[in-house]
C-alpha cells in the first residue's frame, strides 16, 4: 500500500499551475503554485545568508514566517538542493523555476512523507477493533490506513499545490499514537518538536497541556472520577517541562542570544493580514462576512444606506489585507482569540473533569482544531486537515463519529477545490475526491453495517454537486463572470461553512453527551 501511495503521488505531482504574484495571477510554464516559490525562497535564505539575517531578509514578499526549527529543516534540505541546481539557492533569483528545482521540490515532499507513512502504521496499531473479523479489507486498521494515506485533501495540498503538510501531520499523528500507546513523554516530545516546526499547532496545545497535566502529572483519580490532588507528581511535571524548555531552547536559543526574538515573533504572528484569507475559509467569519454583505446590499436597495459612505468592499475582492465591515462590527484579532478560547473551553474542561483516557484527549484535540478553524484569525482553508486527519482514528471506532467524519471530510475536502482553479486541474480534483469519498462512505457503511447519515445530511452533501456545477459550468457563462469574479469562491465558502459548522456542533454535542453520561454513572 505504501508503494502505491508514493507512486500515485509521483504521478499527480506535476500538473499545470497558475502562480500568484501579489494581487495578480499569471500563468507560469514552471508548473507550480505560490507555495513552491515560498519554500524555494526559504531554501535560498537559509542556505545563502547567516542565521542573523534569516528573519530580516525581505527581498521576496514571501519572507520566512515559520518557527526556527522549520528554518533549520529548510537549511538541511538546501544542502541536498545544491546538488540539483545551485541557482535555486540564490536569494535574488525570484520566481526561479528550473526543471531541476521543480524535481527537487517535488521529491523532497515525497521523501519526507516517510514520516507520515510510519505515523499511519503506528496509528493503525492503536486502533480498537472487534474480534472475529476475517475480512482484511473490512478491518478498522485497514480502513484507517486508507483514509489517512489516500486522504484527498493532503494529496492535493502537498503534491499538486505544494507544501510539507504530510511531514508535519506525520509528527502529529505519531504523537497521538504514542499517547494512545501510553508513551506520554514521547508524545509530548513529538508535539513540542511540531510546535517549533509550525506554530499553527498552538491551536491544539490546550488539549495537550491539560491532558498531560491531568492524566500524566496526576497519577490517580478519586472513586467519582475527579482528580486526586495528593497524587500529583512533581517529577513528572519537571520531566515535561524539561522537554518543552530544551526543544524551545534548541529552536529559539540562537535568536534569543542575538536579541532577535521580537523580530522572529513579528514574523510568526503578522496580524496585519486581515480576518480572512483571500479565499474565505469555510468558518463562522465567512458566514459573518456574508451576512454583513447581504445587509449592506439590502440597505442600499432600500435607500437606508448611502453607498458612498460604506467602507470599500475589499473583503470580496480576493485580496489578503485588513478591511472594515459595512454594517456589522468589525472583528479584531483579540475578538477572534476570545471566541476561539470560548469555543474550546468546554472540551478542555471535560478532559480535566473526566479525562476518559487518550481517546478523550483525541476527541478534545479534534474539537480544539475545529474550534480554532471556526473562530481563528486569518484561517487558511487547508487548516481543516488538522481536524480531519486525527478524527479519522475515531471514525473507525465509533458509528456516531463515522457519521460526523463523513460530513466534515466531504465538506472540508470540497472547500479545498479553489486551490486548484485551472481547467486542466478540474478533472483531477473531481476524480480524486470522488474516489476518496466513495471509499469513505462504502467502507465505513460496511464497517458499521448501515447508513451513517440522515436524509437531511445526505441532501446537503448532494448540494455540493449543484454548487460545483454552478461554479464551474453555469457562472463562467454568465455576464457576471467579469464584473463579479469572486462570487464562485463566496458561494463555495458560505455553503461549506454550513456543513463544517454543523459538524462542529454535532461533535461538541457528542463530547458533552459523553461527559454527561459519565457524571450520571457516577451518581
Image (spheres, helix red, strand yellow):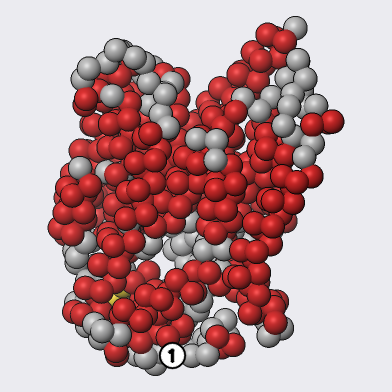
- Give whichever of 236, 330 is nearer the camera: 236
Q: Nearer the viewer, residue 375 or 391?
A: 391
Nearer the observer, 232 or 100: 232
Looking at the figure, which quarter contains the N terminus? top left
Residue beneath the point at 39% across and 46% down: 119
SS assignment at label 1: helix
Residue at 39 percent across and 57 percent down: it is 167
Q: Is residue 504 above or below residue 510?
A: below
Which residue is at a point 21% across and 25% down the rendered structure image?
A: 136
Q: Quadrant of the C terminus?
A: top right
Q: Which residue is mark 1?
A: 48
Q: Quadrant of residue 104?
A: bottom left
Residue 300 x %, y %: 57, 52
Relative to 128, is 14 on the left or the right?
left
Total numbered badges shown on the rendered structure? 1
Q: Residue furthest right?
A: 230
**Residue 197 horizontal side relative to residue 5, left or right:** right
In percent of width and height, residue 419 lies at 33, 57
Mark 1 surroundings within 10 Å by alpha-carbon count, few (fewer than 14), some (14 through 19), many (20 or more): some
**Residue 127: image location, x then y, percent:** 41, 29
Where is residue 521? Give x, y as percent.
68, 8
Q: Is residue 141 left or right of residue 330?
A: left
Examine the rendering and report whether any part of residue 59 can be seen: yes
> Can see residue 362?
no
- Residue at 23% x, 31% y is 438
Amino acid at each position: 500500500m505504501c508503494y502505491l501511495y508514493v507512486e500515485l503521488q509521483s504521478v499527480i505531482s506535476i500538473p499545470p499551475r497558475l502562480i500568484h504574484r501579489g494581487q495578480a495571477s499569471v500563468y507560469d510554464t514552471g508548473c507550480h503554485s505560490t507555495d513552491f516559490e515560498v519554500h524555494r525562497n526559504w531554501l535560498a535564505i537559509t542556505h545563502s545568508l547567516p542565521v542573523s539575517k534569516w528573519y530580516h531578509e525581505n527581498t521576496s514578499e514571501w519572507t520566512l514566517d515559520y518557527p526556527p526549527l522549520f528554518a533549520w529543516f529548510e537549511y538541511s534540505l538546501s544542502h541536498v538542493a545544491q546538488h540539483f541546481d545551485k541557482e535555486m539557492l540564490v536569494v535574488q533569483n525570484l520566481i526561479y523555476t528550473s526543471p531541476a528545482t521543480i524535481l527537487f521540490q517535488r521529491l523532497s515532499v515525497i521523501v519526507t512523507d516517510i514520516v507520515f507513512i510510519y505515523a499511519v502504521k503506528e496509528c493503525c496499531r492503536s486502533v480498537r477493533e472487534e474480534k472475529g473479523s476475517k475480512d482484511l479489507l473490512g478491518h478498522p486498521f485497514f480502513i484507517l490506513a486508507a483514509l489517512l494515506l489516500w486522504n484527498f485533501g493532503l494529496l492535493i495540498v502537498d503534491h499538486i499545490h505544494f507544501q510539507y503538510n504530510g511531514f508535519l501531520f506525520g509528527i502529529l499523528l505519531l504523537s497521538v499514537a504514542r499517547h494512545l500507546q501510553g508513551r506520554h513523554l514521547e508524545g509530548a516530545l513529538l508535539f513540542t518538536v511540531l510546535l517549533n516546526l509550525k506554530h499553527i499547532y498552538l491551536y491544539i496545545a490546550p488539549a495537550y497541556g491539560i491532558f498531560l497535566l491531568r492524566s500524566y502529572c496526576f497519577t490517580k483519580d478519586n472513586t467519582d472520577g475527579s482528580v486526586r490532588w495528593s497524587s500529583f507528581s512533581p517529577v513528572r511535571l519537571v520531566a515535561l517541562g524539561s522537554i518543552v524548555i530544551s526543544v524551545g531552547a534548541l529552536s529559539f536559543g540562537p535568536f534569543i542570544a542575538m536579541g532577535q526574538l521580537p523580530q522572529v515573533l513579528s514574523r510568526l504572528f503578522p496580524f496585519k493580514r486581515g480576518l480572512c484569507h483571500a479565499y474565505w475559509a469555510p468558518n463562522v467569519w465567512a458566514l459573518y462576512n456574508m451576512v454583513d454583505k447581504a445587509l449592506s446590499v439590502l440597505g442600499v436597495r432600500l435607500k437606508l444606506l448611502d453607498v458612498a459612505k460604506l467602507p470599500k468592499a475589499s473583503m470580496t475582492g480576493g485580496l489578503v489585507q485588513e478591511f472594515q465591515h459595512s454594517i456589522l462590527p468589525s472583528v479584531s484579532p483579540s475578538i477572534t482569540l476570545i471566541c476561539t478560547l470560548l469555543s474550546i473551553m468546554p472540551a478542555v474542561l471535560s478532559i480535566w473533569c473526566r479525562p476518559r483516557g487518550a481517546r478523550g484527549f483525541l476527541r478534545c484535540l479534534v474539537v480544539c482544531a475545529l474550534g480554532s478553524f471556526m473562530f481563528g484569525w486569518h484561517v487558511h482553508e487547508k487548516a481543516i486537515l488538522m481536524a480531519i486527519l486525527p478524527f479519522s482514528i475515531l471514525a473507525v471506532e465509533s458509528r456516531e463519529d463515522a457519521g460526523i467524519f463523513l460530513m466534515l471530510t466531504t465538506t472540508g475536502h470540497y472547500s479545498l477545490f479553489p486551490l486548484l482553479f485551472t481547467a486542466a486541474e478540474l478533472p483531477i480534483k473531481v476524480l480524486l475526491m470522488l474516489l476518496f469519498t466513495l471509499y469513505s462512505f462504502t467502507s465505513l457503511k460496511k464497517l458499521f453495517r448501515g447508513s451513517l447519515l440522515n436524509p437531511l445530511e445526505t441532501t446537503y452533501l448532494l448540494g455540493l454537486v449543484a454548487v460545483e456545477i454552478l461554479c464551474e459550468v453555469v457562472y463562467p457563462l454568465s455576464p457576471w463572470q467579469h464584473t463579479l469574479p469572486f462570487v464562485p469562491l463566496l458561494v463555495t465558502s458560505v455553503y461549506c461553512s454550513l456543513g463544517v459548522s454543523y459538524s462542529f456542533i454535532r461533535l461538541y454535542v457528542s463530547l458533552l453527551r459523553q461527559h454527561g453520561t459519565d457524571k450520571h454513572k457516577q451518581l
